[in-house]
């Protein structure tokens, strides 16, 4: 494809995260099922709901931009989710598996945070205020999810894995 302008690049990246969010939506139930600690299970389940809302916000953003909502396969997320699925299949100690699931999920969150950070900057530069508001909301949810996962890991999951 040709990238002739910042607006085209912005739309291209928006299609990428739209596909990425859908991939996350499909992967999270498996992560929730694989988790053992109830608070980690809840965190994954809650983020599944949030992700559904994020997909809807992206659809609104496409609408505000007078563009059709469509995804473009996000190869980066595909790789991260492939790794996540391998973690889901791991056997062994529960706390250690939970620690591995948190690590895999945080890689996904950081990827999303990077993309939304870029998209917010470009939306602002392009004067797309409505899209910016929606993208900022998604960015803030991803950041909060990442912080929550760090808290779960540091408050007990990592420690439990360490003492096995
Ligand atoms: Fe997300």
Image (cartoon, grey):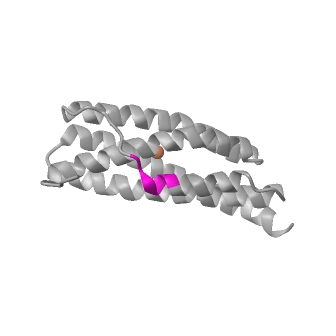
Observer-nearest of 88 and 73: 73
Observer-nearest of 69 and 132: 69
Residue drawn at 48 percent across, 53 percent down: 77
In the image: residue 122, left or right of residue 89: left
Residue drawn at 87 percent across, 66 percent down: 164
Q: In which quadrant of the rendered view does residue 44 lie?
A: top right
In the image: residue 80, left or right of residue 37: left
Q: State whether residue 16 is above or below residue 90.
A: above
Observer-nearest of 41 and 9: 9
Query: Residue 124 lies in magenta, yes or no?
Result: no
Q: State whether residue 80 is above or below residue 50.
A: below
Q: Residue furthest bottom?
A: 162
Q: Residue furthest right?
A: 164
Q: State whether residue 38 is above or below residue 117.
A: above
Q: Which residues are magenta?
A: 73-78
Q: Is residue 156 visible?
A: no
Residue drawn at 81 percent across, 55 percent down: 94
Q: Main secondary structure of the magenta part?
A: helix
User: x, y (%) of residue 119?
Assistant: 29, 52
Q: In which quadrant of the rendered view does residue 157 lie?
A: bottom right
């Amino acid at each position: 494809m040709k990238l002739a302008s910042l607006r085209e690049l912005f739309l291209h990246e928006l299609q990428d995260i739209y596909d990425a969010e859908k991939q996350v939506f499909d992967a999270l139930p498996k992560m929730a099922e694989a988790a053992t600690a109830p608070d980690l299970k809840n965190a994954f389940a809650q983020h599944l709901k949030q992700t559904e809302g994020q997909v809807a916000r992206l659809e609104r953003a496409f609408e505000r931009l007078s563009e059709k909502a469509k995804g473009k396969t996000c190869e980066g997320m595909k790789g991260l989710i492939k790794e996540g699925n391998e973690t889901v299949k791991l056997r062994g100690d529960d706390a250690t598996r939970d620690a591995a699931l948190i690590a895999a999920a945080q890689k996904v969150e950081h990827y999303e945070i990077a993309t939304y950070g870029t998209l917010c900057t470009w939306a602002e530069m392009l004067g797309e205020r409505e899209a910016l508001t929606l993208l900022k909301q998604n960015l803030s949810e991803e950041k909060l999810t990442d912080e929550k996962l760090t808290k779960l890991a540091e408050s007990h999951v990592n420690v439990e894995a360490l003492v096995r």
